[in-house]
Image (spheres, grey):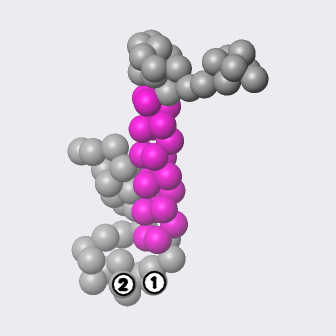
Amino acid sequence: MTLLTAMYAPSKGNGRLDTLRDGLRARFEAWKTYRTTLNELNSLSDRELHDLGLHRTSLTAVARDAAYGA
């Protein structure tokens, strides 16, 4: 049992693999923010978008800025 525990124990300090995993996680979280923002903006009526000073053609740019920064 000790051998199996040692084989499947989470490694500490893989360096490059940790960096890769963290980078992928951050990109996935940013993509989720983009999709959520875009879906919420698309659910608004034209009147609500106008009240916010937005037009439907600019929604992808707004969502991209919200997720990935300006």
Magenta portion: prevailing SS class: helix
Q: Position of residue 30 (x, y in %)?
A: 42, 46
The residue to which callout 2 is attached is: 48
Q: Position of residue 42 (x, y in %)?
A: 49, 71
Q: Nearer the viewer, residue 19 or 47?
A: 19
Is the C terminus in the top left, top right, bottom left or bottom right quadrant?
Answer: top left
Amino acid on which disc 1 is placed: Ser
Q: Which mark is residue 68?
A: none
Q: Residue at x 38, y 56 (%)?
A: 63
Tell me where the magenta segment starts and ends, as one range.
22-41
Q: Position of residue 43 (x, y in %)?
A: 51, 77
Above/below status of 38 relative to 29: below
- Label 1: element kind: loop
| Membership of 26 in magenta stretch | yes
Is the N terminus in the top left, top right, bottom left or bottom right quadrant?
Answer: top right
Inspect this view and state whether residue 9 appears: yes
Q: Nearer the viewer, residue 3 or 12?
A: 3
In this rendering, position of residue 16 left or right of residue 65 = right
Q: Which mark is residue 45?
A: 1
Q: Nearer the viewer, residue 46 or 30?
A: 30
Q: Mark 2 touching mark 1, by CB under 8 A?
A: yes
- Label 2: element kind: helix
